[in-house]
Image (tube, helix red, strand yellow):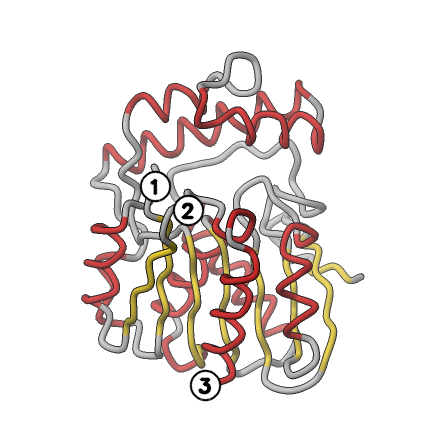
Amino acid sequence: MAWYEPSDGNRVYYEDHGRGDAVVLMPGWGGSIIDLDRLRLELVSGFRVIAVDIPGSGRSQPQPRRYTSTYYRDDALVLLGLLDELGLGVAHLVGFSDGGELALLMAALRPAGALSVAAWGAAGQVVAAPRLLQGLARLPDDPIDELKTLAAYLAEKYGVAEARIMARSWAEAMGAIIDAGGDISRSQAAAIRCPALLITGTDDPFCPPDLVREFAAAIPRGKFREALGAGHDVHLSQRAWLVSTVVAWLTDH
């Protein structure tokens, strides 16, 4: 285990294993690198894997985090600082949900540093329906059906009181991003010059296939794959397929 502590007060937890081309592996909002252990175990035989808990999630600090409308860019810069700290000039960037959004944004902010991107549950913009945002704001007290699994996960990992603060703050940040146009990295698609694989589930309520397909087409070397019948958590519902797809992508690039 290791920690990266930039001067801005963040404390980022990461684990560094394996040898070969570097792969930065990032879970989603509220998640932990443990959630992606199956993929990490497959990768360490051929790559150097830096698995990172994104700021405010897993073991990384601050917790409970209060999110702002600029947190995606802020976090991308923090993680690029981690790569500088490790002396990594280039790396593959792999992530789920917010981790995927950060992978894409990092590739846009530092094109020469990205060997490739593989992201699932990420669309480069926020388009969540009001019902979903309202549901997030009520976690973990009164979750809607689509968010019950997430609510239970957060309550178990962080405790109800801390999960409540996280979720309400995150929902407010999402609303502010949507009010400003929803952009995360979509407007910078042309700057993502490395090969980029975007995956989403047929029934993903946050990143519908048409939206992700359009984003992939806007990236010069973008590719799109749809996980048929899956929702947002493709690594859970179609774990074997997701692992084999990402491993094959990284091996080819």
Do the residues under discs 1 and 3 have CB atoms within 8 angstroms?
no
| Residue 203 numbered mark, or none | 1
In the image, is 63 to the left or to the right of 110? right
Q: Nearer the viewer, residue 144 or 181?
A: 144
Q: Which residue is mark 2?
A: 230
Q: Position of residue 164 (x, y in %)?
A: 58, 21
Q: Secondary structure at mark 2?
A: loop
* Relative image position of residue 195 (x, y in whole percent): 35, 78
Mark before the other along the chain sequence, 1 or 3: 1
Amino acid type indicated by mark 1: Asp
Quarter of the figure with the N terminus: bottom right
Mark with earlier residue (2, 1)? 1
* Residue at 41 percent of width and 53 percent of height: 73
Q: Residue furthest right?
A: 1
Q: Does 230 appear above or below 37?
A: above
Q: Secondary structure at mark 3?
A: helix
Image quarter in which the C terminus is found: bottom left
Spatial CA distance of label 2 from label 1 is 6 Å
Q: Mark 2 against mark 3, which lies toward the viewer?
A: 2
**Image location (x, y in percent) of residue 11:** 68, 51
Mark found first going from the N terminus, 2 or 3: 2
Are the residues tagged 2 and 3 within 8 Å (C-beta)?
Answer: no
Q: Which mark is residue 252?
A: 3
Specify whether 149 is left or right of 44. Answer: left
